[in-house]
Amino acid sequence: MNAIMTFATAADQMQRYDAVRRKSAEQAYYRNADYNGRNQKTLNDLEALLIGKNEPEAVQESREFEKLDAGQVKQIALPLGKTLEETIDAWRDVRREAVSVQEPTTADHQLAATASAKIMETEARLALQKREQSQMEAEANRAKAEAFKVAAMDLPTDVEREVLLEQKRFAQAISAYSIQVEAKRNGFIAEWPSINRTA
């Protein structure tokens, strides 16, 4: 009985595999046909242009938006400006147009919400960019101030340099002497080192 069920199960799996493979091949065929069909007009236009039969036509595609139900979103081109400020202004225009409709649909509200989110994201990116730029400017100003400080510093003359060196030597001598006095007070005796010879 197990052998029969195993054979039946294997046959079912093979049938499922064949069905999925056929379905995938069918989808690939339809995708290829759709792709070639859309591009055939472009190929014909390019061929005619190369041969010189006609001039290229400026094709204006006008999309009419139909009223969308819940869950559907209007397809718009992402407005990108040359600067972040231009991008923010473009998204504000998109939001304004989405809300300005007399009877806004759910898709209009979703578009307005998306535009608001993109505005906030771009404003945050702009704030980060400005913060980074101000930090770079502050660092550059700090480096310039350091350079001016070093340039404005007066270098000591030879006599002043000698006085500074004498003061430094005097401070080192006092420090060494005070350590020796403290050590003698605590019972340490300075003796010459003794050398023991072992043979």
Image (cartoon, rainbow, N blue to C red):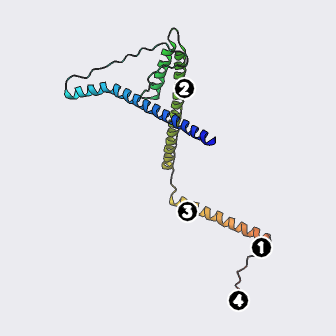
Q: From the image, tell me which residue sits under label 2.
A: 120
Say which residue appears at 27% left-offset and 26% top-offset: 44
159 up-or-down from 97: above or below: below
Q: From the image, tell me which residue sits under label 4.
A: 198
Secondary structure type for disc 3: helix
Marks 3 and 2, Cα distance to the nearest angstrom? 65 Å
Callout 2: few (<14), some (14-19), or many (20+) C-alpha neighbours within 10 Å?
A: few
User: Mark number for residue 162?
Assistant: 3
Secondary structure type for disc 4: loop
- Sequence-first tag of 1 and 3: 3
Q: Residue 123: image x %, image y %? A: 52, 27
Secondary structure type for disc 1: loop
User: Mark number for residue 188?
Assistant: 1
Query: Which residue is most to the left?
Result: 52
- Sequence-first tag of 1 and 2: 2
The nearer-to-camera label among 3 and 2 is 2
Marks 4 and 1, Cα distance to the nearest angstrom? 27 Å
- Sequence-first tag of 4 and 1: 1
Q: Residue 170: image x %, image y %? A: 64, 64
State the quadrant of the N terminus: top right
174 up-or-down from 197: above or below: above
Marks 1 and 2, Cα distance to the nearest angstrom? 75 Å
Say which residue appears at 40% left-offset and 28% top-offset: 30
Residue in front for this viewpoint, 131 or 9? 9
151 up-or-down from 87: above or below: below
Say which residue appears at 50% left-offset and 11% top-offset: 101
Residue in front for this viewpoint, 51 or 130? 51
| Residue type pointed to by label 1 | Phe
